[in-house]
Image (cartoon, rainbow, N blue to C red):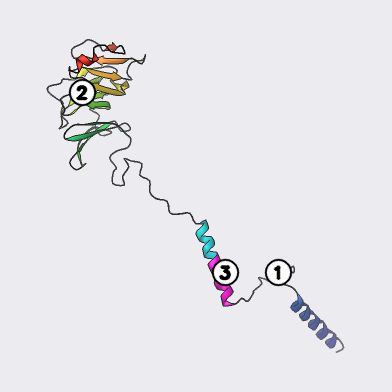
Amino acid sequence: MRLAPLLLTALAAAAGACRDTPHDAPRDPAAGPRTTRSTPGAEAGASDASAQLTRRITPAPEHPRWIRGGSERDTILSFPRTLAVDDRHLYVLDADTHALLALRLADGALDWRVGGPRDSTIAPVALTAAPSGRGVILADAAHGRLLALDADGRPAAAAPALAFAAAADARSLCALPDGSVLVAGADPAGALLRVVPHAPSPERVPLPWPDLAARHR
């Protein structure tokens, strides 16, 4: 019975020590989480600060960047590289798919296409506007030729295909009124080549070209 007063005294002393313990004093991890009481105003301030912090660290929404032709509705072009135009169409050569697309000038809609992954009959790698003002002339890597197409995408009857073995290496074309076609990029030495109808082989063009003006008359 003598131990009872001593036990009560010890418990009272321990309770007083807990009341006097500052908030930043070391705590026993086994004691569990500490709870604090705050006023409604303090809770609102903490919530606002948290929201501001969230707004600062949250990245802004990323705007979509269309890389296939430049428009979210455009999935027909992968890497448009060369253009030509006549009074009906804008012709676009896609260097990635090796397809030639004819877009109507009136509304921009696709009128026809040749080449591409689903058409192995032709592989255009370069093009130029036809001197007649209708259609294009293209370098066809699949058959080693320069092929003229009319405005409807058919081989032009008035301009037969020109044999050109190095068509796959052509980078740029220029059709002249006399029926010949200048080709850049196909010569190993870097020379400009001129493909002439019925000629056995292309000829190298010296620069400057003295009679170039005469060929444009």
| Along the line of sight, the residue nearer the viewer: 47 or 75 | 47
Q: CA distance from mark 1 to mark 2?
A: 86 Å
In the image, residue 27 sits, relative to residue 99, either above or below, namely below
* Label drawn at residue 30: 1
Q: Quadrant of the N terminus?
A: bottom right
Left or right for 190, reference 146: right
Q: Earlier in the sequence, mark 1 or mark 2?
A: 1
Q: Position of residue 68 (x, y in %)?
A: 33, 41
Q: CA distance from mark 3 to mark 2?
A: 74 Å
Give the mark toward the camera: 1 or 2.
2
In the image, residue 36 sits, relative to residue 132, either above or below, namely below
Q: Position of residue 127 (x, y in %)?
A: 25, 26
Magenta stretch: helix, strand or loop mostly:
helix
Q: Seen from this angle, which residue lies furthest top?
A: 200
Q: CA distance from mark 1 to mark 3?
A: 28 Å
Q: Seen from this angle, which residue lies furthest left?
A: 157
Q: Kindly identify the amino acid type of the residue bearing the numbered disc 1.
A: Ala
| Residue 180 located within the stretch drawn in magenta | no
Q: Kindly identify the amino acid type of the residue bearing the numbered disc 3.
A: Ala
Location of residue 155 (image quadrant): top left
Q: Residue under circle 3?
A: 46
Q: Residue drawn 56% across and 70% down?
A: 45
* Label drawn at residue 41: none
Q: Earlier in the sequence, mark 3 or mark 2?
A: 3
| Along the line of sight, the residue nearer the viewer: 45 or 186 | 45
Location of residue 94 (image quadrant): top left
Magenta residue span: 35-49
Left or right for 37, reference 126: right
Q: Residue drawn 76% across and 77% down?
A: 20
* Label drawn at residue 147: 2
